[in-house]
Amino acid sequence: MLNSIIKTKISNLWDMFWAAGTSNPLTALEQISYLLFMRRAEDVGLVEEDSYKWSFYTQCADIDLPKTMSDIFEHLKTINNEHEPFTKAMEGAKFEITKPSLLRAAIDVINDIYEAAEQERNEGQIFQDTLGDFYELILSQTGEAGKNGQFRTPRHIIHFMCELLKPTLEDKICDVTCGTSGFLVGAYQYIISQNSGKEEWQTDTDGFKIRTSANAIKPNSKKAKKLTTGTFYGYDIDTTMIRLGMMNLMMHNIKEPHIKHIDSLSQKFDEEEGNTQYTKILANPPFTGRIDSLDISMILDRVYPPKFDKDGKRQKQNIQSELLFLERIIQLLEIEGKAAVVVPEGVLFGGSNAYKNLREILLKDCLVDAIISLPSGAFKPYTGVKTSILVFTKKGFKNKDFSTQKVWFYELETDGYSLDDNRKKLSDNPLPRAVEFYDNKIDDEAKKERRQHFYVPFGEIEKNDFDLSFNRYKDFDYEEQQYDPPQEILKAILALEVEINNDLQELKDLIGYDEKD
């Protein structure tokens, strides 16, 4: 994560953009993201000629730097085929930093960010998402983060979910609400770690074992081509997020990212992507119901059966979008495909028909591998909503019988960071332990007590309206309270009343209060 020095420099840079007339924080974010992309293009081999390399043109003193960098950006926009998603997404994107002093200041900050990232890497934080960190910081400082239920998933939570899902070179991986593509970058970094041949394992700052070279994947091999051109897919409704997500993946050497500008809950999605399926899905859908229910996919008709008036016209409905995102994820998974999804706790125990419908669909169509309860502050400072991670494997579609026969529950009391708005790193690293328990949970069925982790049989879940919340099944210790006899309690109350009356009389005498007045 960005250190305090870099955060201060970015804050100062934002102030400079504001002073230069850029009042929209997303515009500043987009422009600085272009700089991050241009800086990284040299490292990942997207440019070969010296004149297009950051290390060359940013050091030239006798050029029109704003014009030069604008021309280079136009070149980078078209490095892929015109029909490929990246080129399409970058249509209309303009490099608009025209003030030389502002551009020089921005270049200095970009260099500092990459220097800090390299230092973090050397100190053990190999799992990185620099653009995502930068995006989060800018939005947090401008009050935009968390609006409409959208906020970035912390990278240690992303890493944790990748360790649970264990993506491979053979997978086709998707995020249905990808934002800056943090989950896809995380999946890529996990795959790289698992294909680093004989490189020694290192321990990162969150306690995970990781490697970085991917030397077991031969350059220009089928595996390399599959990983960099046919593995990572995402959807988002925000044009800025599409561009950020595309650039983020390309900055991590994904040559052909597939991020599409489309609402993954819409009828248009059915027309264009309805037959697409994935082997792994990682997601943290927005926690908001503010969507146009009239444009909702007709395929997603089990959680919220569509309603029509007497003329056959579809009626508006009050819809919780997180429920529909889960239904869409189940539909998009291929048989035996797996998903790890962050959901608000209410999804697991909500009593309305829609909530019950969703949980019944989940338990019928999927094998629910695990429900991991996250601590309440996991997404601070954006929200204090209690959340859990659902891990499940698709077994069928529109099944009549239940695929899940038991569910494994686990409680994370802390995620290794303080649970306040500052979210400072603590000395404890509980996430690798949780992964170890998840991978080796064979003895939990014999446990008599339900504490931090345990199995619950399907029959018990069914009796509780398919409630899947951790606290519904956890054993709590109840201490019997000892109370004084009622006579003693009444005596104490009367004595307190006398004391209050005496104090009131003393106050009246002090201020000369006369009730006749």
Image (cartoon, grey):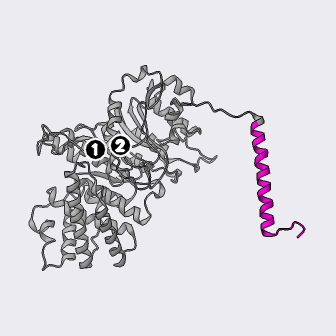
364 w.r.t. 52: above or below: above
Q: Amino acid at mark 1?
A: Ala
Q: Left or right of 397: which side holds 127?
A: left
Q: Position of residue 244 (x, y in %)?
A: 31, 59
Viewer-proximal residue among 133 and 229: 133
Disc 1 to disc 2: CB gap under 8 Å:
yes
Name the chief secondary structure element in magenta. helix
Q: Which residues are magenta?
A: 488-517
Residue of label 2: 282
Residue of label 1: 187
- Can the viewer see residue 231? no
Residue name at image x 33 percent, y 35 percent: 433
The local crowd at label 1, few if under 14, some if 14 to 19, many if 20 or more residues have their Cα within 10 Å, is many
Q: Secondary structure at mark 1?
A: helix
Q: Is residue 326 magenta?
A: no
432 w.r.t. 105: above or below: above
The local crowd at label 2, few if under 14, some if 14 to 19, many if 20 or more residues have their Cα within 10 Å, is many
270 w.r.t. 408: above or below: below
Residue name at image x 29 percent, y 36 percent: 166
Q: Quadrant of residue 509?
A: bottom right
The C terminus - image quarter: bottom right
Q: Position of residue 478 (x, y in %)?
A: 57, 31
The N terminus - image quarter: bottom left
Q: Position of residue 406 (x, y in %)?
A: 45, 25
Viewer-proximal residue among 420 and 486: 486
Q: Amino acid at mark 2?
A: Leu
Q: Position of residue 454 (x, y in %)?
A: 44, 27
Viewer-proximal residue among 379 and 17: 379
Looking at the image, tell me whether mark 1 or mark 2 is earlier in sequence order.
1
Q: CA distance from mark 1 to mark 2?
A: 9 Å
